[in-house]
Image (cartoon, grey):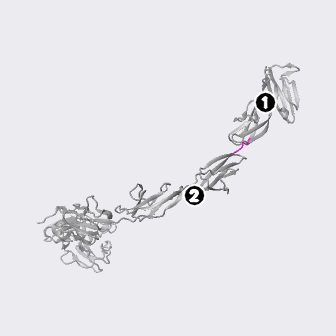
Amino acid sequence: MVTLMEVQAQLGFCTGNSGDPIFTETFGTGTTNVALPAGTTSYTFVTATPGDGFYTVSSNSAYFDWFDIPDHTPNDTDGRMLIINADFVAGEFYRTTINGLCENTSYEFSSWMINLLPSIGCGGSGIPINVRFEIWDSTDTNLLARGDTGSINGTVSPEWRQYGLVFQTLPAQTSVILKMLNNGSGGCGNDLALDDIVFKSCGDTVIIEDVNKNTSVNICEVDLPFSTELVAVPDFSIFSTHFYQWQSSSDGIIWADIAGETNQNYITPPLNTNIFYRVLVSEDPVNLTNPLCNSSSEIYIMNVVPPPDPPLSNGDLVICANDTTPLSVSVPSDITVHWYDAPLGGNLLQSDSTTFYPNGISGTYYAEAESRLGECLSNTRTALQIVYLEVPQVTDEILEFCENTSITIHANTNITTATYVWNTGETSEEITVQEPGLYTVDVSNGTCEVTKTIELRQIDNPIIESVRSNGNDIVVTTINTGDFLYAIDGINYQSENTFFNIEGGLYTVYVKERNCAEVITTAYLHFYIPKFFTPNNDGVNDTFKLAGIEYYGTSSVSIFNRYGKLLKNTVNSPFEWDGTYVGEGLPTDDYWYVIIIDGQTFTGHFTLKR
């Protein structure tokens, strides 16, 4: 009767914890081809090229147009592998018995395999390899597990692949038979190599957790003794039932059973030293004492952490109040530092920093060490003192002064005993300067020094570009700009640069900056020719007057009516006409003038209105 275990019907590997190899077949080493032990295969052994239905155990595969490769076993020298050229009839080509197993125990079988025929072999249509793995009981009547690789086609380059099966032994069963069969027939292709056949025990992944779900714990010495309840947590990936044996170790290497502790939970005694715990797990209680039949859990570690040394002070500080140098301490890389305002208790000022800046507040501050492992605190705190010295107080300034004057600038500090060094070389609290620019003064109280900066800006005097007459208006133009004031009498200043309705004549034009005393002057002869006059004795424009003409070197004025008759003429003298001719007032009309001033002739006409 043949029985197939349904859960083992597919290829696969142990998803839990695998033990050390119980059986390994690497096919040995050597440059001479050797045969398998009798009964291992029904194929025929050859020492040279294996044909269909033949095999060899060789350290190379340089046959036909196959890949020429070494075996799979790592670090082998002349390592051998089993080379199979499939028979024309599908069927078994390898079997071996595995002894030393445990009953009711899960195992993982695995083997590495390669298709020796490149993908271009046989014109690109080579027969793929296709292998079935079977695990039978020692009577060869009960099939425990099987799995098929499916068709494995040739590849461009050599490619070893691992295949495996998970199975469980039966009660009282300590050996099994491994069989390998070709699912396909021989011909051009179906050529393979096998290596590194391994059997391992297979168990659940089991972790150990305490009541806080920790898988390890770090305990500060001050918190000893420590006790907790541990629980073994399997993932049920392999075992359906679990039996336990708790163990302890002082070094994580040599383990000892804890008498009577065979439950899933374990309450530790009060602990005062480092200790390791694990639990042995099996599916059957009879297998707990056999290391080939059980598996061990992950390790739970209880680590005792001593208090760290107090931080090492990098020194007290006596510094100026504007110095941002912090207090600092030194600790190992696995230690963090917290700062307090008292040697015990107090207020937490800063966490996780080896430096602390008290923001200019003198006093004593305390650094406490904490281990990153276990968060254990130092037994004492390190006191560090900082004293802030008074710093001279100064304020930078931007000042203005008038051109062609001097200005006195001051350090203006709060310390009467301070010393001063200006960038001009002077050492008094104040200096008098005449040039614009940047001035600095270093102010010191003997220990602390600050620098004051004064930017001195010059208020420029106006520079007169031109003065011109616009009709009877006088317009003053400057080259530069500023808050300028203008006058033509030296008394009445205005911000407007135009003087309106000014009688002709010789004037002095005055221009000054509003905030400065210096006045810039220029003489200007204001001369214009009126466009009309109204001789009606009302006191306004009663005459045609050429005011200021008398200030020119030479002048000549002639007045004509529209018919060219000369009505009035003067030479090198002031000119004023009241609109009469030989004592008689002339009528409203336009009249013409010819004016010659210093050789320059002006002609035109004006209106007499009555």
Which element is circle 2 on?
Answer: loop
Image quadrant of residue 35? bottom left
**Quarter of the figure with residue 211:** bottom left
Q: Position of residue 361 (x, y in %)?
A: 49, 54
Q: Please tell me whether the stretch drawn in magenta is mainly helix, strand or loop.
A: loop
Report the span colored magenta: 459-464
Q: Position of residue 570 (x, y in %)?
A: 88, 29
Report whether residue 220 is seen. Answer: no
Residues 28 and 117: in front is 28
> In the rendered image, is residue 215 in sight?
yes
**What residue is drawn where x is 58% and y is 54%?**
392
Viewed as shown, does residue 18 lie left or right of 556? Answer: left
- With respect to residue 105, does 460 lie above or below? above
Disc 2 and disc 1 in contact, CB within 8 angstroms:
no
Q: Is residue 72 magenta?
A: no
Question: Which mark, residue 242?
Answer: none
Circle 1: residue type: Glu
- Residue 219 or residue 202, whichever sits in front: 219
165 vs 384, left or right, is left
In this rendering, would 352 be left or right of 83? Answer: right
Q: In x, y percent, where is residue 174?
A: 16, 71
Q: CA distance from mark 2 to mark 1?
A: 69 Å
Q: Which residue is mark 1?
A: 503
Question: How packed is label 1: few (under 14 Cα within 10 Å), some, or many (20 or more)?
Answer: some
User: Residue 415's x, y, as percent?
Assistant: 60, 53
Q: Amino acid at mark 2?
A: Cys
Along the viewing direction, whichever of 315 and 455 lies nearer the viewer: 315
578 sits to left or right of 492: right
Q: Quadrant of residue 271?
A: bottom left
Q: Earlier in the sequence, mark 2 or mark 1?
A: 2
Q: Name the residue rendered at 71%, 46% in the picture.
A: 403
In the rendered image, which residue does mark 2 sit on? 448
